[in-house]
Image (spheres, grey):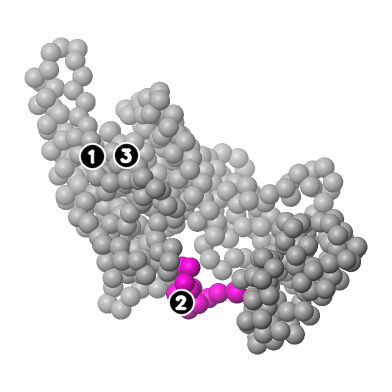
Amino acid sequence: MEQATARETDGSDHGALRGIRVVELATVVAGPGAGRYLADFGAEVIKVEGPGGDPTRRMGWTGEGEADSYFWKLVNRNKQAVVLDLKTEDGKNSLWSLLLDADVLIENMRPGKLEALGFGPEELLRRNPKLVILRVTGFGQDGPYALHPGFATIAEAMSGFSGLLGEADGPPLLPPIAMTDEVTALVGAFATMVALRHAERTGEGQTIDVNLLNSMFQIMGPLPSAYAHMGYLQPRLGAGIPYTVPRGTYRCADKVWVAISSSSDSVARRLLVLIGLGDDERFSSFQARSRNRDALEAYVAAWVAERSSEEVLREFRRVDAAIAKVLDMRDIFADEHFRARGMIAELDGVVMQNVVAGLSRTPGRLRHQGRPFDADTKAVLARFAAKKTGASRAGKAKPAGSSAKDTSGKGT
């Protein structure tokens, strides 16, 4: 397991995004997840919580004697923790001091609430024209459902995703992890980088409308096209998908489960030869295998069930066909590939996933886990107050008509 060591830094001195300042007003997972990805690659992310704190601090498992959950420590790693009461003028003024020279604002309030607080996009961009405003909601900023409560479960149901999960004769299922939030976090981080690129070229900020429903709808692949042009409605197929057969999970003789996929013709041919069906015309193409799904799946399940997992894995790998054991967390922590790739890290005594992607020249970095409540409020606000004072003094000394914009404290 890779050891990641925390550093006393705001993050702006390292990584491809050094010098980018993000103010995060978002709570729970999707919005803060986008902030986490930016922070991992060097952005300075100032996490702003209300007096009651982000509920993620209390979500899920918490270490013995710890106030904050493991979920909090993961999703809000590499960020500074600031508390502001936006119902007060002091809180609003402090937020403006953070936003006036920020590059990104991330928020996930219901549509209209940011505007009601006095921080609508029009006013934000008037005061800070280069600001990128990432708005994360359940259904988007407009439309008939915009003001409905939006959680991952609802997006999974409405996007068509849950309707595909489960056995043919069983109920639709929901994923047992915060899948939609995690997908939306990646969409938000990606969209933010696109908008930052535009702002870098032109000096123009903009608003980004990212939502849970559209993020999940995007991963439906060709199903919208298949329905629009063919009237096709994909049934629940358990672990199967219509265009890859065989594909699923299968139980070996020693009760170990393995996952098998034949998503290319070449892999499918090698698999069929291995189980003795290489010359069977019923399975000679994607379309033929799909037409004869039940028969082929039955052959594969029977072949696997007669052999130990060791033999099944060995034979599949001998013919270079795709297979893997179905792992749980205990298996993952013992797996040589996870160890060799450093996919699990220890950060300030807490074990968690490492950075999501490897960059050869500007790698991401774990600096510290999610900070305690109110840990950085005084230091951050003092730093920005000092900047404001310094900028005012510099402005008085400048000739008329000159600019006195202060960019200190951003890792330049």
Whichever of callouts 3 and 1 sits on the residue coming sooner in the sequence is: 3
Q: Nearer the viewer, mark 3 or mark 2?
A: 2
Dot in front, 1 or 2:
2
Check whether the beta carbons of the residues at disc 1 and disc 2 lie within 8 A of each other: no
Query: Which comes sooner in the sequence, label 3 or label 2?
Result: 3
Q: Is residue 410 above or below residue 122?
A: below
Contact between marks 3 and 2 (CB within 8 A): the answer is: no
Q: Start and end of the magenta stretch?
A: 325-338
Mark sitting on residue 411:
1
Q: Where's the C terminus, which quadrant?
A: top left
Farthest residue to the bottom: give it: 254
Magenta segment, principal secondary structure?
helix
Residue 334 bears which disc, if any? 2
Residue 59 located within the stretch drawn in magenta: no
In the rendered structure, which amino acid carries the disc numbered 2? Ala
Q: Find residue 237 and report its horizontal and vertical position in percent.
A: 76, 66
Few, some or many residues within 10 Å of mark 2 (<14, 14–19, 20+): few
Q: Which residue is disc 3 drawn over?
A: 20
Q: Which percent across, then down, holds residue 66?
A: 28, 73
**Horizontal and vertical percent for residue 163?**
71, 61
Q: Is residue 329 rendered magenta in the image?
A: yes
The residue lying at 75 percent from left, 65 percent from top is 270
Spatial CA span between label 1 and label 2: 39 Å
Q: Is residue 219 left or right of residue 366?
A: right
